[in-house]
Image: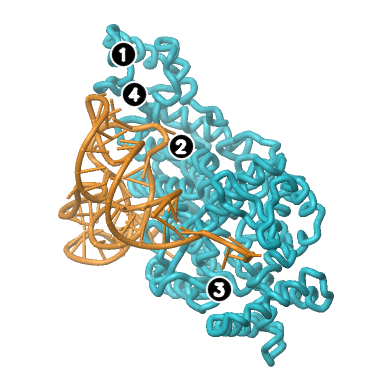
Chain colours: A cyan, B orange
RNA sequence: GGGCACGUGGCCUAGCCUGGAUAGGGCAAUAGCCUCCUAAGCUAUAGAUCAGGGGUCCAAAUCCCCUCGUGCCCGCCA
């Protein structure tokens, strides 16, 4: 059910007067170029009165006020909507509400947890998929009317982070700089590979840390803060700002953890002193080590409990490696802990490099900063060549917008289940299905917007390009809904590309300025285009510029 | 071994949930288009046994089963 004034609904109502058991599914958006919408009549073809039925629906539809034409082709009933209807619905919505579609306000409070990468180094492009998806998803839900917040769960406990701390302790250079901390971290993990007993030093430190030894706690926090600030500023460069940062160490001796443990009390079993609970499929989920220190699952359960106090719907954006883990977590949350909030998980597959899996520890990574820098440099070269008339400042502004938008779009457009292999040549390509392609089509409308006359009479003559563009614009809410329902970002990206393609057809075939009787009508179509494109690009983090 | 994903022209990808009319795009290739609102654009050509096999159905890229290939998970890591 779409939440705007949908003409599809009124068509279905009309059809129902003839065939009461018709449903919304029978009327689909046509993708094959036959019509705007098509009614599939296959499932009624067995009826004795089928020929009569077809004709009855046809004549009922021909009288419908929004329909310009309806015709039978085999078992399809093809329907075209009046161009003026499209134009008026969108025009009115934008004039009166400033937005199309004007959808509902849902009071649900939603928390999107994303990124949450270990603060053990700069964020790399693999993790960036998490951030981009999480950020766009929260924008989509906000656009839908939910009250949305975003949160980053900062992992400042456990082996990785303590390993980072040990690296710091055992290196001569005590500067709190990212590069220095990172090299200490890498050195420690090399040492562990060669000599497993080094892990004991980490375990000993974890114990000190969890027991709250002041100097340890303070220094770990300090190191994590340095790393986290690096990640925060990298993300800021691509337009991502996370509302809250919640430190995992805060749950070590928390009310939430106690509450979880008491909810689970009856199910807890022990094995050589370690505490675990058993799931329905027999999996053992460990909560505490034999030495009493907590495990990630327990802290994560406490964190979910905490989130559920303030939100109705929790959305976790996670790598596909967390699938089984999340299933276990969810089983515990729904069946053993009485969590009020609904929890949804969004999984994405990994981004790898030509050289294999990405890893901060091994150094086989492309960091987000590296990508941004190369992308900006690349964009700058192109803008310079195309716009020799602009000042350095103007060039920089465009190059930056192009680089950031391109990075975000390249990731957002791919559906989450697909594994990605990062290739520089593709990342730096700014033609075809890329953000600049979209941005460019917007920039071309600027002069039209400024100079075309838009308040004259509107003719009733529409050509195929105007008609297709109007229809594409009208279909925007359907993509919004697909994105929201599936917790996906790529439907918006696909839609935007299709919309831009449709606009380019229009632009190349329909002159606006000085087109006489067509000018007002076309100017209004362009104006709606700018509005919808801006809306959709806002969800994807694509910056639209008036010139480029 | 068990579980979860993914497999669409040389490369990348949409469509799959909710089966239906000629499988959309892009990159790379070839040939064109700037006296006309920005050529980061547009047009045309070439390129696909929708991994393979079986099944259901009037109808399968789409649903079901099997096989193969790839990735991920199966820790007192996070």
Q: Where is residue A57 in the image (x, y as percent from the top left)?
A: 36, 13
Residue under numbered circle 4 = A40
Residue under numbered circle 2 = A475
Left or right: where does residue B65 sit relative to residue A110? left
Disc sitting over residue A369 in the figure:
3
Task: Point out the residue furthest to the bottom here.
Answer: A172
* Depth order, front residue of A82/A486: A486
Q: Say if mark 2 contacts mark 4, CB within 8 Å.
A: no
Residue under numbered circle 1 = A54
Q: What SS does tag 4 mark?
A: strand
Q: Label 3 is found on which chain of the structure?
A: A
* Depth order, front residue of A450/A434: A434
Q: Label 4 is found on which chain of the structure?
A: A
Q: Label 2 is found on which chain of the structure?
A: A
Q: Which of marks 1 and 3 is nearer the N terminus?
A: 1
In front of the other: label 3 or label 2?
Answer: 3
**Mark 3: few/some/many CA within 10 Å (<14, 14-19, 20+):** many
Q: Label 1 is found on which chain of the structure?
A: A
């Amino acid at each position: 059910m779409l939440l705007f004034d949908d003409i599809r609904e009124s068509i279905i109502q009309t059809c129902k007067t003839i065939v009461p058991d018709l449903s919304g599914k029978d009327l689909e958006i046509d993708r094959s170029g036959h019509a705007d919408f098509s009614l599939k009549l296959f499932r009624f073809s067995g009826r004795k009165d089928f020929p009569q039925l077809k004709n009855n629906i046809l004549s009922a539809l021909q009288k419908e006020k929004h329909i310009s034409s309806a015709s039978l082709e085999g078992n399809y009933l093809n329907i075209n909507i009046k161009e003026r209807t499209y134009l008026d619905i969108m025009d009115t919505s934008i004039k009166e509400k400033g937005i199309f579609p004007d959808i509902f306000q849902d009071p649900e409070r939603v928390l999107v947890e994303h990124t949450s990468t270990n603060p053990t180094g700069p964020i790399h492009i693999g993790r960036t998929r998490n951030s981009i998806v999480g950020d766009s998803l929260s924008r989509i839900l906000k656009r839908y009317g939910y009250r949305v917040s975003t949160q980053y769960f900062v992992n400042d406990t456990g082996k990785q982070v303590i390993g980072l701390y040990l690296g710091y302790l055992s290196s001569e250079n005590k500067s709190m700089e990212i590069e220095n901390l990172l090299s200490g971290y890498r050195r420690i993990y090399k040492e562990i590979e060669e000599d497993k007993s080094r892990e004991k030093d980490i375990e000993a430190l974890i114990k000190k840390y969890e027991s709250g030894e002041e100097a340890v706690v303070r220094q770990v926090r300090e190191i994590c803060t340095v790393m986290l600030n690096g990640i925060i500023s990298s993300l800021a460069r691509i337009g991502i700002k996370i509302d809250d940062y919640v430190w995992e160490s805060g749950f070590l001796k928390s009310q939430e953890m106690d509450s979880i443990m008491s909810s689970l009390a009856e199910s807890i079993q022990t094995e050589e002193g370690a505490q675990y609970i058993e799931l329905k499929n027999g999996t053992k989920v460990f909560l505490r080590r034999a030495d009493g220190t907590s495990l990630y699952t327990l802290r994560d359960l406490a964190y979910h409990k905490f989130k559920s106090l303030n939100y109705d719907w929790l959305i976790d954006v996670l790598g596909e490696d967390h699938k089984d883990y999340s299933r276990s977590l969810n089983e515990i949350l729904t069946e053993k802990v009485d969590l009020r909030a609904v929890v949804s998980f969004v999984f994405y597959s990994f981004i790898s490099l030509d050289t294999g899996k990405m890893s901060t520890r091994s150094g086989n990574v492309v960091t987000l900063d590296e990508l941004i820098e190369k992308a900006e440099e690349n964009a700058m070269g192109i803008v310079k060549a195309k716009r020799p008339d602009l000042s350095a400042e103007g060039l920089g502004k465009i190059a930056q917008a192009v680089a950031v938008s391109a990075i975000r779009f390249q990731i957002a457009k791919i559906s989450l289940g697909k594994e990605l292999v990062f290739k520089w040549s593709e990342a730096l390509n700014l033609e075809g299905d890329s953000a600049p392609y979209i941005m460019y089509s917007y920039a071309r409308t600027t002069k039209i917007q400024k100079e075309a006359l838009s308040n004259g009479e509107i003719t009733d003559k529409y050509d195929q390009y105007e008609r297709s563009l109007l229809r594409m614009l009208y279909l925007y809410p359907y993509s919004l809904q697909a994105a929201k329902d599936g917790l996906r970002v790529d439907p918006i990206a696909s839609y935007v590309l299709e919309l831009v393609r449709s606009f380019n057809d229009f632009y190349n075939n329909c002159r606006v300025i000085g087109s006489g009787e067509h000018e007002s009508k076309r100017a209004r179509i362009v104006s709606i285009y700018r509005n919808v494109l801006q809306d959709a690009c806002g969800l994807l983090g694509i910056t639209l510029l008036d010139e480029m």
